[in-house]
Amino acid sequence: MKQFTVKIRENLLKRRAALLEVIQKADMERSSDGIALEQDMSEQAASEQNNNIIEALNGIERKELADIDNALRRIELGNYGICEEDGDFIDEKRLIALPFTTTCAEHSKH
Ligand SMILES: [Zn+2]
């Protein structure tokens, strides 16, 4: 494994641990909210709205977690940093900026 990939992998694992913590915390808050008793209507609405916000944030984090898992899988398989479209090496600067990218700048869908 290239030194560069080792470093990227380290960063991905760190980010993954941080994301898991956020997601677990959000899950806990949601379940404690769920058992709250005797809320009046407005409180209930506010808490529901709050839950939706948590849910949305959580969605972003879950998506990033999936991206990280995909990147880690590609590292294990040895095809990390290789463009899906043409098999060329992706520029390292691009990988630092976009560690989950699976294409070179030329084939970027953005
Ligand atoms: Zn390409």
Image: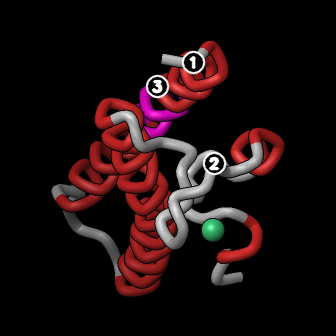
- Of residues 107 and 101, the one nearer the viewer is 107
Q: Which of marks 1 and 3 is nearer the N terminus?
A: 1
What amino acid is at disc 2? Phe
Indicate the position of residue 53 as horizontal and vertical percent values. Answer: 51, 71
Residue to which mark 1 is pinned:
2
Considering the numbered disc 3 on the image, is that residue within a helix, a strand or a loop?
helix
Considering the numbered disc 1 on the image, is that residue within a helix, a strand or a loop?
loop
Indicate the position of residue 16 as horizontal and vertical percent values. Answer: 45, 34
- Of residues 45 and 23, the one nearer the viewer is 23
Residue to which mark 3 is pinned:
13
For the point 40% across and 68% down, which residue is it? 55
Is residue 63 in sight in this rendering? Answer: yes
Q: How far apart are marks 1 and 3 (CA)?
A: 16 Å
Depth check, mark 2 against mark 3: the one in front is: 2
* Magenta extent: 15-21
Indicate the position of residue 23 as horizontal and vertical percent values. Answer: 38, 45
Q: Distance between the residues labelled 1 and 2?
A: 13 Å
Q: Mark 2–mark 3 contact, CB under 8 Å? A: no
For the point 30% across and 36% down, which residue is it? 77
Image: 37 above or below 71: below
Q: Which mark is residue 22?
A: none
Q: In this view, does 90 lie to the left or right of 103?
A: right
What amino acid is at disc 3? Leu
For the point 52% across and 31% down, which residue is it? 12
Q: Main secondary structure of the magenta part?
A: helix
Mark 2 neighbour class, 10 Å CA radius: few under 14, some 14 to 19, many 20 or more: some
Depth check, mark 1 against mark 3: the one in front is: 1
Image: 107 above or below 32: below
Q: Which mark is residue 89?
A: 2
Q: Which of marks 1 and 2 is nearer the N terminus?
A: 1
